[in-house]
Amino acid sequence: MTNPYAGGNDDFPRYEPTDHPEDRPNYGQLPSYGGSHEENTQGYVGYQAGQRPFTGKASAIDAVSWAFRTVFGNWKLWILGALALFVLSIVFVAIAGGINAASYSGSGEPTAGSWVSQLISTVLSLVLSLVIMRLALFQIDDARTGWGYLFKNVRWWQPLVIMLVIGAVASLIAFAAVGGTVYGLLNDAENMTEDEAVAAVLSVMGIMAVISLISFFIQPFFSLMQWFAADGDSVGDAVKKGFQAGKNNYGQLLLLAILNFFIIIGGFLLLGIGLIVAYPVTLLAQAHMFRQCAGRNIFPQA
């Protein structure tokens, strides 16, 4: 009788491949996270085809609900992290105050020490903003996100460019609107009567209130741009996609801004202590809302 297993393998039976999971070349591999891969065809970094994109309607309520659950569920990172930032900010303010006092000239003019402390404060704020934005996106992708994710795969210059441009444009608009009035008020204050000075101050406050109101209603068009850049898009793509996503989800982005405003107010009303919860909640809600509007992953790996 013919041996069906013969054929140069010392008469041992040959193992034929099957469709079992363990036979696949990628069996046992773990998904990777942002920044470890080149950009894919969707234009953002670090996401593999296996991740599920968000296909539903964007919801500000869902974003805030997820943010509250996440802050309390991962309190060692978000609540203790916010507390650490609060303490560090107090220490920095005390140090900056000491530097300013030591270099005070008595003339009322800004000193070198005040300029240096202001510059350091601005740089630290920008760096921390970029790091925390990336951390929030990691939290969406991986429920195990912790302190080890700090400074990991941070996108530096792309979101920074967008933040600086938006800030510069806003400052120019504000200066054009009230700069002349403020300059005239400061230079002619001695010649004004009390009623004239009060009227000038109220006019400046009124103009700023109008600008703030207009900014509130137009912010959905540009608020997502820096998030797109932080999530891996180029500056140009982030601007285009951010504007389009803001336009398509205008109402929900306005609702999120309102909800975040009242969350921050609630934090202040709790003697400021509530801010160690309010701040990370509003940040994570923005990140989650961005992912919804972008149609990207919102399902953390457990």
Image: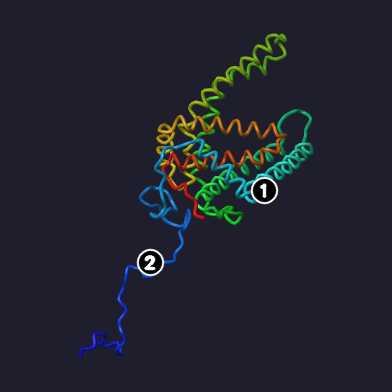
Q: How many marks?
A: 2
Q: Position of residue 273 (x, y in %)?
A: 71, 38
Residue 60 percent location from the top left of the image: 50, 35
Describe the element under mark 2 as helix, strand or loop.
helix
Residue 232 x, y percent position in the rendering? 45, 48
Q: Which residue is mark 2?
A: 21
Q: Is residue 125 left or right of residue 17?
A: right
Task: Name which residue lies at 37% across and 48% down.
Answer: 42
185 versus 44 height, above or below: above
Q: Is 110 located above or below residue 228 in the figure?
A: above
Label 1 with label 2: CB-CB less than 8 Å:
no
Q: Picture coordinates of residue 300 (x, y %)? A: 50, 51
Q: What residue appears at the point 58 percent right and 42 percent down from the top-left corner?
A: 68
Q: CA distance from mark 1 to mark 2?
A: 41 Å
Would residue 106 appear left or right of 225 to someone viewing this image?
Answer: right
Residue 17, quarter of the rendered image: bottom left
**Residue wearing tag 1:** 80
Pick whichever of labels 1 and 2 is earlier in the sequence: 2
The disc placed on residue 187 is: none
Give the left or right position of residue 79, taking residue 59 as reference: right
Taking depth in this image into account, of 22 and 181 the one nearest to the observer is 22
Question: Which amino acid, mark 1?
Answer: Leu
Between tags 1 and 2, which lies in front?
2
Where on the picture, by quarter, is residue 11?
Answer: bottom left
Q: Nearer the viewer, residue 135 or 301?
A: 301
Q: Amino acid at mark 2?
A: Pro
* Label 1 Cα neighbours within 10 Å, binned few <14 / some 14-19 / many ≥20: some
Q: Residue furthest left?
A: 1
Classed neighbour count for the residue bearing mark 2: other residues with Cα under 10 Å, few (<14), some (14–19), many (≥20): few
Q: Residue furthest front?
A: 1
Of 123 and 46, the residue lying toward us: 46
Q: Quadrant of the N terminus?
A: bottom left
